[in-house]
Image (cartoon, rainbow, N blue to C red):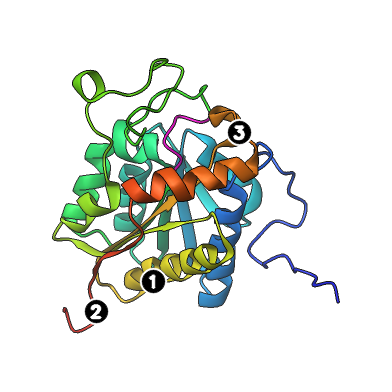
């Protein structure tokens, strides 16, 4: 019997798919929509998304949104949350946006323990602008700005975002998940829900790093791109929860 999937209430009914074929952003955004519906927070939510493929979030979710400059999603979100502490505020960014151009904003938001939830899509490249080397580009990976591959002497090491965010005292939850298999997708949804719940509980900053494919800039089929996530990305960026603070502070 064929299974029919319904569209979450928080997603627009007339959206036009704007991502490249095989891109995992569509999966991630659907998971966000499902979590919003399950928590019943659609009417009280405000998102902040800055320049990058992540900006297309606005095309899919029927919620209030603020568009921020590149790398400034969490800076804008902080202003929104402080002006309207009664609202649920979250950001949706790419790894270049969150961990390079906006690294200072991201780290200091976590250090301050702002009650904001943040999702970062890590596809090891700048997807929207042509596949340049980013902060999470793997060693040896070829990009348009590292045509011979990333090497340590010239480019340094890729940043492990979830681990760094977990070190911040204001972080209540930090996890890394992936979208390469159905079990991992289910785990990703639960992580997003926990990152949202810590904000609802007033515990501090909630963060989820999502390992995602970029078939277009990796010059791969979607199947091969997901294989790369499993065989090359996960060994470097291990999945798991790196920090979780409970209501009793432990």
Residue stretch in magenta: 122-127
Compared to residue 37, the image places residue 213 above or below, namely above
Residue indicated by mark 2: 246
Bin the neighbour count of mark 1 within 10 Å (Cα to Cα): few under 14, some 14-19, many 20 and up. many
- Image coordinates for residue 182, horizontal then vertical, percent: 58, 64
Q: CA distance from mark 3 to mark 2?
A: 41 Å
Query: Is 221 colored magenta in this rendering?
Result: no
- Image coordinates for residue 223, horizontal then vertical, percent: 63, 45
User: In the image, 51: left or right of 1?
Assistant: left
Q: Is residue 48 visible?
A: no
Earlier-in-chain disc, 1 versus 3: 1
Q: Quadrant of residue 97?
A: top left
Which one is in front in this view, the residue at disc 1 or the one at disc 3?
3
Measuring 32% from the left and 46% from the top, which residue is drawn there? 236
Q: Quadrant of residue 177?
A: bottom left
Q: Which mark is residue 37?
A: none
Compared to residue 111, the image places residue 132 above or below, namely above
Q: CA distance from mark 2 to mark 1?
A: 11 Å
Earlier-in-chain disc, 2 versus 1: 1
Residue indicated by mark 1: 194
Earlier-in-chain disc, 3 versus 2: 3
Mark 2 lies on a secondary structure that is loop
- SS assignment for the magenta stretch, majority: loop
Which one is in front in this view, the residue at disc 3 or the one at disc 2?
3
Bin the neighbour count of mark 3 within 10 Å (Cα to Cα): few under 14, some 14-19, many 20 and up. some
Outermost residue toward the bottom in this view: 248
Mark 1 lies on a secondary structure that is helix
Residue indicated by mark 3: 220
């Amino acid at each position: 019997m064929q299974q029919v999937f319904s569209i979450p209430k928080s997603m627009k009914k007339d959206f036009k798919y704007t991502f490249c074929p095989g891109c995992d952003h569509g999966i991630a955004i659907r998971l966000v929509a499902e979590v919003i519906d399950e928590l019943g927070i659609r009417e009280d939510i405000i998102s902040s998304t800055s320049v990058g493929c992540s900006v297309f979030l606005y095309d899919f979710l029927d919620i209030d949104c603020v568009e921020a400059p590149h790398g400034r999603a969490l800076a804008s979100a902080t202003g929104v949350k402080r002006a309207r502490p009664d609202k649920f505020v979250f950001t949706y960014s790419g790894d270049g946006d969150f961990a390079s151009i906006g690294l200072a904003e991201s780290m200091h938001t976590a250090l301050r323990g702002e009650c904001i939830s943040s999702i970062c899509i890590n596809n090891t490249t700048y997807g929207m602008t042509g596949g340049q080397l980013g902060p999470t580009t793997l060693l040896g990976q070829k990009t348009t700005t590292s045509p011979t591959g990333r090497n340590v002497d010239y480019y340094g090491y890729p940043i492990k975002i979830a681990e760094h965010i977990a070190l911040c005292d204001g972080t209540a939850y930090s996890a890394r998940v992936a979208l390469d298999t159905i079990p991992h997708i289910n785990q990703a949804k639960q992580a997003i829900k926990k990152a949202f719940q810590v904000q609802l509980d007033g515990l501090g900053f909630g963060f989820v790093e999502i390992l995602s494919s970029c078939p277009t800039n990796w010059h791969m089929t979607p199947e091969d791109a997901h294989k790369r996530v499993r065989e090359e990305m996960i060994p470097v960026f291990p999945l798991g929860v790196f920090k979780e603070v409970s209501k009793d502070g432990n």
